[in-house]
Image (cartoon, helix red, strand yellow):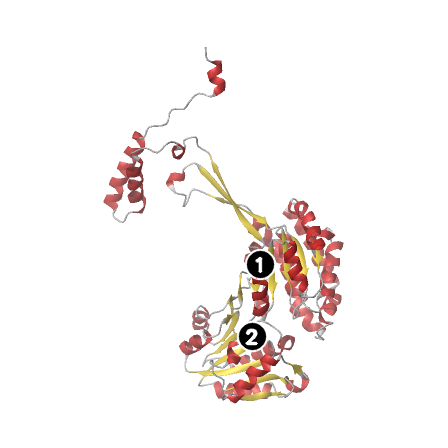
Amino acid sequence: MLHAVQCARSAQPGWVGTPLKSRLKILRRFRGLAAEQAPRLAGLSSASRRRPLSEVLTAEVVPLLDAVKFLEREAPRILAPRRLGRRGRPGWLFGVKAEIRREPFGVVLVIGPSNYPLFLPAVHALQALAGGNAVVVKPGVGGGEVMRGVLDLLHHAGLDHRLIQVLPEASSGAAHAIDAGVDKVVLTGSAETGSRVLNQLAGRLIPAVMELSGCDAALVRADADLDLVVRALRFGTLLNQGATCIAPRRVFAHRSIATELEGRLAQAFAEDSVDQGEVSLKPEWAAVIREALSGGAHLVSGVLLESDGCRPPLVLAGAHPAMRLLQNDVFAPVLSIVTVADDHEAIELARQCPYALGAAIFSRNLREAEVLAGLVPAGVVVINDMIVPTADPRLPFAGRQRSGFGATRGAEGLLEMTTPKAIAVRRTTWLPHLEPAQSSDAALFENYLLAVHGTRWLARIKAGWRMLNGMGGRTRRPVLPSTASRKAAP
């Protein structure tokens, strides 16, 4: 791991010295090569998960290449130096020119997940490269081959092979890379994994972006199109066999349509439990599901097996938010339905979960749905759809609470791969603050504060006049001639 980090670090100064336009040309060539090799990349990604090729192409390859195109088009604007004009500059900083630049961190460690082993680590790595960083990638279990495929295409596109290193899949690889000295970490994984990595980072003061677990809410209002709701919930629950962080887990359905929705979901999922086969569950997930069933919930779809497995999807009706099932990041095709009286109750119950990654709202009244979206505790809210709109490369992806912090993707994700540097240039020679303090200075600043920040106009005008008089009477420290000029004097 030490060699990989050192190798990346040795190449990074030359990369950051490469004009952004040239860096983006390499990404453009990568995009073209990846499009030509799309079936191969999709096959490498799906090999360990046995997912349909069409699903991987649409869920991973398409959004990845769209994200690269976004970088090609928008990175110059996003990363351009921002010059600050006169507006908003305090008067006492007259003559100071200011600029904010974006600079890379150095070596970014990307810790990838196993559920989307191509899209998620690759998009973070490519944003880091666009920002001028070198990258070390620790793939999720089963993701090593596809990341090496990405690496191969980047090399063919002209990227220095030292700039991106792929580590072994074992979790210890990330820990060793952090010990070797990286400058930032971008992790996609469970809240448990995020907590463990943060503990290691804390002692080294290494910054991080954490894209962690979800337990997403779907709010179904009384006026919702139930045909659409059922199709969307079915899609979101079964996508990637339930292993999607923003899959729906908690459905808050208005009481006027809750019973009908349960019946429609049972009918829609009737054949899926056979098609999906048997899925194993972690013992702790099976435990909270059994606890919910013994606490009053009942299955309207799927079968929970004694062996801590299930025939998904599991749809539990009659659930209530106090159940541990609705407070946990169960990473499986499990859906719980909670009946609510109105929007207010739906929002209040949604807030009780410690995870706040994504949410969905279903309503025919788009204006009211958008107002409701502003109240939902989530980093991304989709109205009348499920998951797919979040793949828009312009949108950031950011969790809250136990779902993490920081942003990935979009302009915000690219900025996360850089750190700001402020540069201030003094263009005048009058620098009174460098002179010894005078007895009149306190009154001068008191009048300044009243003139600039006071609430009464007449008092502000009088204070401004006194301030100007005080500045005019402020004596300057005599400027001593330089040593050279004293020597030259007769």
Up-down: is 466 above or below 9?
above
Answer yes or no: is residue 203 visible. yes
Q: Which residue is depicted at the point 75% across and 63% down? A: 37
Please indicate whether residue 208 sits to the left or right of residue 172 in the image.
Answer: left
- Coordinates of residue 315 in the picture (x, y in percent): 56, 84
Q: Which residue is mark 1?
A: 201
Q: Dot 1, how many residues are within 10 Å of its Cα: few (below 14), some (14-19), or many (20+)?
A: some
Up-down: is 92 above or below 64?
above
Q: Amino acid at mark 1?
A: Leu
Q: Secondary structure at mark 1?
A: helix
Up-down: is 176 above or below 100?
below
Residue 435 picture quarter: top left
- Coordinates of residue 65 in the picture (x, y in percent): 66, 61
Q: Amino acid at mark 2?
A: Asp
User: Which of the two residues, 139 or 343, is positioned nearer the viewer here?
Assistant: 139
Residue 187 picture quarter: bottom right
Give the numbered dot on residue 329.
Answer: 2
- Coordinates of residue 314 in the picture (x, y in percent): 59, 84
Q: Secondary structure at mark 2?
A: loop
Q: Which residue is depicted at the point 41% across and 33% down? A: 434
Q: Which residue is depicted at the point 72% across and 52% down? A: 162
For the C terminus, the image quarter is top left
Give the label, 2 or 1, closer to the camera: 1
- Coordinates of residue 455 in the picture (x, y in percent): 27, 49
Give the numbered dot on residue 365.
Answer: none
